[in-house]
Image (cartoon, rainbow, N blue to C red):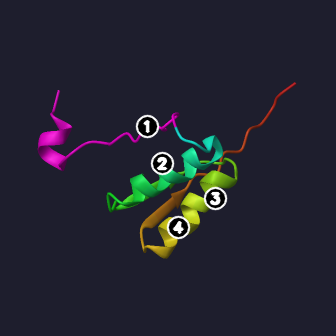
Amino acid sequence: MPCCRGERGPGPVACALQTRLRHVRVGPFQRNERMLSLYPRYVVAFPGNGVLERLVIDAKARRVTVVEVICKVRYSK
């Protein structure tokens, strides 16, 4: 089994949500700012809510490549 980190550089980095904030609703936006402060090469965006849309807008403003994944679900009877 090949070692991906040794061949391709560092792996993914997790930024946890701070729950001890004075304003709880600001937490996801601050987490997004911390993620973008790491200067990523790519941001992969799955369908989500307004917080994710704001992350995509901020990433595009910082000229980070954004890969948007479109999920289509088909229900069969």
User: Which of marks 3 and 4 precedes in the sequence?
Assistant: 3
Q: Secondary structure at mark 4?
A: helix
Residue on which the image places disc 4: 58
Q: Tell me the magenta residue range.
A: 1-20
Q: Which mark sits nearer the N-terminus, 4 or 1?
A: 1
Q: Are marks 1 and 2 in contact (CB under 8 Å)?
A: yes
Tag nearer the camera, 4 or 2 = 2
Q: Nearer the viewer, mark 4 or mark 1?
A: 1
Which amino acid, by three-letter code, is at mark 3? Glu
Residue at horizontal 51%, vertical 34%? 20
As measured in the structure, the alpha-carbon distance from the residue carrying label 3 to the one carrying label 1 is 19 Å
Residue type of the residue flagged with mark 4: Asp
User: Residue 23 location in percent, x, y?
Assistant: 62, 45
Residue placed under numbered mark 1 in the picture: 16
What kind of residue is marked 1? Ala
Q: State the residue lying farthest toward the right.
A: 77
Q: In the image, is residue 16 part of the stretch drawn in magenta? A: yes
The residue under label 2 is 31
Q: How far across and down, in percent of the image, does residue 64 sit?
A: 42, 68
* Magenta portion: prevailing SS class: loop
Q: Amino acid at mark 2?
A: Arg
Determine whether the residue tagged by mark 1 lies in a helix, strand or loop: loop
